[in-house]
Every structure is written in structure tokens, then in C-alpha cells.
Amino acid sequence: MPVLHFRAFCFALMMVAIPSLADLPSPVSNNDEAVQRIVSGIISYTRWPKLLAPPRICIFSSSRMAKIIEKNITPLSFTPVIVENNEETLTSNCDGIYFGSESPEEQMKLIAAYQPRPLLLIAEQNTQCVTGSSFCLNINATPVTFAVNLDSLSRSGVRVNPEVLMLARNTHHD
Amino acid sequence: MPRPTFKRTLRRISMISVVITMIIAWLILSVSSMMTLKQYAQNNLRLLSVSISHSLEAPMVFRDGPAAYDTLAMLGKQGQFSSAQVVDSSGVIIADWSGSADNNRDMMGGLVSKWVFPTPVIQSIYHDGKTLGEIHLTAMDDIITHFVWTSLGVLTACLILASFISLSITRYLHKGMVDALNNITEVAHDVQTNRNFSRRVSAERIEEFHLFAQDFNTLLDEMETWQTQLQRKNASLLISATHDPLTGLANRTAFHQAVESMMNDRSRKIDAALLFMDGDNFKHINDTWGHAVGDRVLVEVASRLRAFAGDTHCAYRLGGDEFAILLTGVNATDDLLALIQSLRHALLPPILLNNGETTTMSMSIGYALAKCTATPESLMEVADQNMYLEKNKRRLAFG
């Protein structure tokens, strides 16, 4: 029941947020900045084995992040690669994947296809964070928070500073 | 104002030096320890701020105010700082923690904390070489204030204790000096008041005192010698002042004193008598055989008179061929005349001279009974008159 409630709440929020974004194409909302800060923060605390260059992060075009990147708010510490589908993602040689509206099952499939390459996995539409990505952003909350799926993270092959994990606010904790 | 004693002077000197030394030591120790303490406390706060800034790195990266607050609260509850503020690079406050410590502390404590921590410590928070913001730490001053007062108190107590110990030790060490000086002073005083020149100062432990005591003893030796010499000299002077050097009989001075004292003593005056004697032919002896023989005759006459006087009476040579005898135990004129007769008898034997010849010294004797006269002068006058009466009688008799 609480899950259902939460989903309804998210939906209502989206219903409010999307029309306002449509009406105002250019404004930089606080949440955009927060989303980008959290993503950059997670990436800055993540270590890939044998990676010297800035990490390539594949960002699904369905995500809010893809739109934020297009707005080019602040310089990025990683190389963003905007992708449309799984095939494009698999050929892009990414070090991390940022999921948009993809379901946890789709995410799992793609991740399995990428193995054993170390991957940083972030999703913005997976507030449950039980399966799929390692990090799950709650972009509709103010302030923007994130959760961690430790199972996924331990399988992903990247090392993340424990400080970050302590800042994660998993839904079942709150 | 009474003069201070040596002991008190020493005590005062040591007291002044100890107090000044301890005050200076207290000042130096206090200032240096307070400086060190301040340095240490500030370093401690700085170290704390650095470690907090590290703990705040991740919360600042994610702009997680509540997480930053949790970090501050967790460390703040340890009592290391009283308040802390985290601001981002644009000055917006991310987290603000303040301990529930009551702010109504006393003025001195406030002064101490103001001196130790004049301003809050500011430490930047970095991530990947970029400054994300800074932390402002205000120190917890209760602990440091308490520590300042405690250390000052302990320091003061230690120095007071050290002063007492050093004062009692110097007092004990001064005792030897004071005793040495007292020893010398006591001997000097004894010598001065009791003329006890045989006293000597015992050996002293301290070199200067020992030298002083030795010199003092040497002086005492000399003084003792002088004293005995003086006494001997005085005795001989007394003898020569009251005795005739030629015959050894008491002289005129002694005679006058004796008569004076006898006449003033009622018990002696009652049975005393005076004889005056004058040689009748002394000038002739002198002229015939010379002064040496005259002297020889005088010595012989004197020795006969001394033998006659014995222990009961006393013979005097008044000058030239004049002699006198103070008789005692003479109650009546008859006794006196009997004594005069025996004296004449004693003078009768001829005197053997150096040249083998002999001569006789005939004497005119005048007498006076002390109880019949009032003053020494009248006594002597009576005796003198009697003597000249006899001398005239003899002159008439022998032509």
C-alpha cells in the first residue's frame, strides 16, 4: 500500500511538473542543478579499474538528465553520450549508463549484455531501487535525493566511496 | 628602632631573594605555559576543523544539509566545539549546529576564551581540488578556561610550596653561621664583662669565621699577656710607691696611710702607739766612712727594726736616718716604755762595717699613745716633740 501511495504521489508531481516545463522551455530549475550535482558527485566518488580518461557516461535520451546536458548548465567532469536505445548503448563503449524511463527489467537486460565491463548505473525513474541500477535518483523530491542498491553496486565492478553510500536515502529508510 | 639580629637579617635576605625568584619564575612559567596552551588549543581546533572538513566533503558534494548537520552534531556532542557553520562557496548556510551550552559564563572565563580563540576557525572544504565551501568553528571554551585556571592554580601552589621548602632549608643552613657568630660574640662578651681573658673561641666550620676566631684568639692571647704583665707591673709599682728601695721598709707614704687608717679605726686606736726615731750620729758616720757605709748602717738598723717589729708591729723609714714604728697591743705608758727599752737594747750591738771596723748607731726615740691624741697630725706632732726632747737631752749629756 505505501508503494501505491508513493507512485500516485510521483505521478501527481509529474503531472504538475511536465506542463510547467513545456510552458517554460529555458528556465533552469533548482532541481536540474541538483540532479546534475548529484550525478557529478556520484561520478567523482566512483573509481573504475584501469580508467585514466574522464568516464564516458551513456545517457538515455528519455531521461531528464539528457535535457539538462543539452542546456549545458555547468561544465561536466565526465563525457556524456546521449543514446536512444540499447543497441546504441552497447556500441558506445560506455563506463556508465544513465537510465531514463527504461524499466528495471530492461535495465537488467542491458546490464547483463554489458558484462563483465565495470559500469556505473544510475536511474532516475526507479525510486524503489530494488532491482536494476546501483543508484536511483528521486528527481521529483525537493531536495533531490538518491538511493543505493548495494547488490547491484557490488556486481557492477566499480568502486564507490562509502561516504556517498552513507548519504543515500533509501525509500524504506525514510 | 632596635637593630635587627644577624639571624633575622639572614632570614630577611633569603626571604626577599626567594620571593623575588619565585615571582619571576611564576611570571615566566605562567606566560610561557599560557602561550603554549593557546598555541596548542588553536592547533587542536585547526586540526579538528581539518578533520571535520574532510567529513563534510561528501555532504557538500551532494549539498546534503541534513547529512552535514548530522556530522557536525555527532562531533559537537563530544564537546570539542560550541558551534559550527557550514557555508557553500557563495555564502549560503548549508548546516548550522550550536551546542546547548549555557552562554551565561563569567566575565573572566569570557576573557580567557576571547584571548585563546579570538576568532572562529575557518577551514575550506575541498573536493577534487575545488573549494566547495567552508566551515566556521567556534571553540568550546569551558574546557580551556577550566584548564587555564587549574594550571595557574597548580603552578602557584607548587611555587608557594617550593618557596616554603627553600626558606626552611636556607633557615637550617643559616643556623651554622648564626651559631658560629653567636659563639664568637658570646666569648667576646664574656671577656669584656668578666675580664675572663682565658676564654678561647672554638674552631669554626666556615673559613672566614675560622680565621676571625683564630685572630680573635691571638688577640686574646696578647691581651692576656698584657693583663698579667700589667698586674705584675702594678704590684711592683705599688711596692715601690710604698717602700723604701734601700732598706725595704715601708716608706713615708705608707706610713701616713697607716697612721690615717689606724686613727680612724676606734678598735685599733685604743691600744696603738707611735715611735719616732732619728739617728744621732748618722752625719758623723757618713762623713767619716762615706755614703756607702752610711747606707750599710741604715740597712742594718732597718733590719734590726724589722726584727723588733716582727708580725705585731710595723716599721717605716721616713727618710734619711728617720724611722718610725707603729706599735699595737700597747695599753699603758709602762708597756710602751718597756718596749722602747727592748728596742734600744736591740739597737745597741755594734754594726760591723765592710772595712772591718765597727760602729754603733744611737737613736733618739720619741713616742706617743694613739688614744691620747685626736688626729693623726697631733699624734705625729706629740711623737716628734718627744723625740726632739730626748735628742736635746742626749746632746746635753754627750756634749
Image: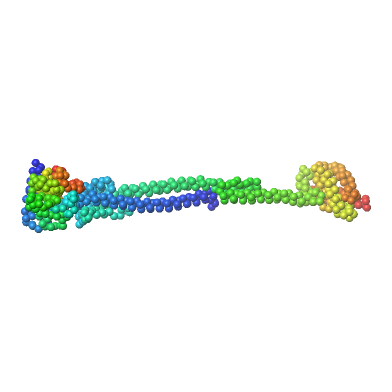
User: Is residue B212 visible in this depiction of the protein?
Assistant: yes
Q: Position of residue B244 (x, y in %)?
A: 80, 51
> Please, is residue B134 above or below residue B272 in the view?
below
At 47% from the left and 47% from the top, the residue drawn is B166
Q: Position of residue B137 (x, y in %)?
A: 26, 52
At 17% from the left and 54% from the top, the residue drawn is A53
Q: Using the image as rendered, state which of residue B261 and residue B294 is in the foreground.
A: B294
Colour setup of the view: rainbow
Q: Using the image as rendered, state which of residue A115 and residue B341 is in the foreground.
A: A115
Q: Quadrant of residue A7?
A: top left
At 33% from the left and 47% from the top, the residue drawn is B146
Q: Position of residue A111 (x, y in %)?
A: 11, 47
At 9% from the left and 43% from the top, the residue drawn is A3
Report the number of numbered marks. Answer: 0
User: Is residue B278 visible in this depiction of the protein?
Assistant: no
Q: Using the image as rendered, state which of residue A94 and residue A74 is in the foreground.
A: A94
Q: Position of residue A109 (x, y in %)?
A: 9, 46
Q: Is residue B141 left or right of residue B63?
A: right
Q: Is residue B161 left or right of residue A52?
A: right
